[in-house]
Image (cartoon, helix red, strand yellow):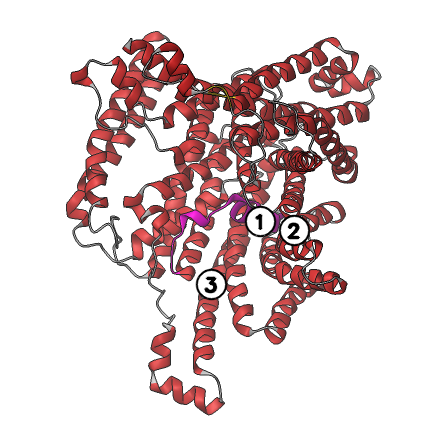
Amino acid sequence: MDLLNALVAFTNFVFVPAVAYGAQLAIGALGVTLIYGILRFSNFAHGDTMAFGTMITILLTWWFQALGVTFGPLPTALLALPIGIVLTALFVLGTDRVVYRFYRRQRAATSILVIVSLGVTFIMNGITRFIIGTEEQNFADGERFVISAADFRAATGLAEGLAIKSTQAITLATAVIVVAALFWFLNRTRTGKSMRAFSDNEDLALLSGINPERVVAVTWIITAALATIAGVLYGLDKSFKPFTYFQLLLPIFAAAVVGGLGSPVGAIAGGFVIAFSEVMVTYAWKKVLGYVLPESLAPEALVQLLTTDYKFAVSFTILIAVLLFKPTGLFRGKSV
Amino acid sequence: MTPRNLALFAAVALLFLITGVFQSWNLALSILNMAIVSAIMAMGVNIQWGYAGLFNVGIMGFAALGGLAVVLTSSQPVDGAWRAGGPGIVLGLLLGVATIGLAVALYRRMPKGLPRTATILAVLVGGFFLYRAVFDPAVVAVEANSPEAFGNIGGFGLPALIAWPMGGLLAAAAAWAIGKTALGLRSDYLAIATLGIAEIVIAVMKNEDWLARGVKNITQLPRPWPVPQEVDLQKSQPFLDWAGRWGFDPVLTSSIIVKLAYAGLFLTVLLIVVWLSERALQSPWGRTMRAIRDNEVSAEAMGKYVTGRHLQVFILGSAVVGIAGAMMTTLDGQLTPGSYSPLRYTFLIWMMVTVGGSGNNWGAVLGGFLIYWLWIMVEPMGLWLMGAVTAGMTDGTWLKTHLQDGAAHMRLVTMGVILLLVLRFSPRGLIPEK
């Protein structure tokens, strides 16, 4: 019984939150990795693209709610999400047209593009704060839980409860759909194949008649969609705040780099590696250990390796440790 | 210095003069002081990026380490803190370093394989528990030492001027450790690793209360030698007589004199750093650096020791940033780890170098002055502009309130637009490399 309790406590406090967070990071990191693979620079504006897309979705959600439109037990934000994606994609394509295309034509160095993306970060960050303000926004509605802790306890008779928030279930379901769709697109469609060819060898791809502008445009659209989805899922699960989203850039970069920049599989693996290490290192293990260990050995302290304030530190320590042994990440990323 | 560059510097000087004449000299001088600090940080970035092409986006971390050095060097010793746990903390840290050193040595010495992995893991895990066993009680003891006012280990009570080179040294030591581990990484991988390392530095400073009280902040750090306290000036009879003779307001004048004294000190440091950097850039060493930056492979083929030079320049640049960070903390008189953000302390500094002209020391200095002035002044200008735009609207309407509230955020948009415009139309910066 105690072992079961320990398992439930572990699932409730570590496994489920880490899986949801990992899925959000993975979708975010996929966007970073795609841009790196095709456009060949680290996009510092990705966190703010997420914030921008989420902001648009929130505004649409409020509008829907004002009109009385809801999505039954699911959050209204999911209804607004497709429109949010379209608008974000248009905005991102606009930045490509106005800003990035010039440097692409010049074949500017990667580092110049990174600094350019810093400029875009400043602008998008400012726009988001200007439109929606700097405060925290909660926009999740619909059912709160798929399984609530009380129901679980009543059904199983265990002392520990297992709660699965509906946002966590939605995150996981969406992540599976998104990843499946993305991989189908990259591996099975003509456009997807041309993107991979372009990423592997730009000159060869150009020689075989692939239109680079089209590849780049499709990449930006997919990235905008991924960023908006990741941002909305994170916002539903926790809450939306422009500054938090800017900071999300750190674990997302860490995930993309740990997996290997330019490798989609790596981005997904990286997302879960980062999420699990963050949650496990900052979780207080007292409860779980209390069930597993005999009474005499049960810990009195919290058994928390590091406080939650260290979560970014954890992701980057993992990142550096991985890079020391595999300088281009777990899945052999590119380096330009 | 070509006439064009002189004109650019004169134009930026004019911006400060205009602020002084039309707003207040107090404001102009406080912008100037931080602008000098920013210019020195920009020189540090320029040494790494402009000379050697190292993409370090961990500037914030080195600036914060400089600030930490100020607390450890120049704040007053705390009664009983050292006795409570000082030796334990030092021993604990040494044990931690020894563990890592041992693990690295084993990794290098032992043949590859399962035994090596197992031994290293055992050393690391065992070392970690040993370190926590020694370190934790000492930290608890130090933090329990009059926690409302102190709870930190305290400083050496040395003069603030000594704290600045100490800031450089601390940043240099950190840069050595980071460079040893991370400099092998390529372009963007290095950038992201340094971005993360800076976050780790800030996380440590926020949470290790024994070090500098964490987010409870350390205030009232001492001023450097010639800078007086405003209250002392206002009490001194000769000063009051002098101000009275000229008809100055004593309170305002004392604050301006303090800022002028800081400006003098900071300018001295800036000129020393510029002079040394210019000498270094024009020396054979500087030419080697640029050769490595422009073509690493051929420089290596010419027998240049690329890894060593990279480490050297990484340490030097970080030390300059650390000195600037220390100067900033002394100027503020307090260390507030919560106030460090990558936008302000990394990306803005990078923007200064890019806009000013990377690879050119004078460019970095110009960029530092110009961008910092804009960073401060864009906000009031945005407010004024929004005031003008919304003047015709009725008071209290939703749009008017929203626009006026949002005006403060125009700062970020403006900075981004400036960066993009410079990169587009003057990609090598205002004062390009020769």
Name of the residue lying farthest toward the bottom: B245
Whole-angstrom CA distance, mark 1 to mark 3, is 20 Å
Expressed as whole percent of the image width and height from the top left, the position of residue A258 reads: 51, 22
Mark 3: amino acid: Phe
Q: Quadrant of the N terminus of chain B?
A: bottom right
Where does label 1 land, which residue?
A: B348
Q: Classify mark 2: helix, strand or loop.
A: helix
Which of the 4 image quadrants contains residue B70?
bottom left
Which of the 4 image quadrants contains residue B133?
top left
Q: Nearer the viewer, mark 1 or mark 3?
A: 1
Where does label 2 land, which residue?
A: B415
- Above or below for B87 versus A163: below
Mark 2: amino acid: Met
Question: Nearest the camera: B42 or A166?
Answer: A166
Expressed as whole percent of the image width and height from the top left, the position of residue B360 reads: 61, 51
Q: Classify mark 1: helix, strand or loop.
A: helix
Question: Nearest the camera: B208 or B380?
Answer: B380
Q: Classify mark 3: helix, strand or loop.
A: helix
Label located before the other in sequence (1 or 3)? 3
Tell whether B148 sits left or right of B111. Answer: left
Q: Nearer the viewer, mark 2 or mark 3?
A: 2
Which chain does the residue under circle 2 lie in? B
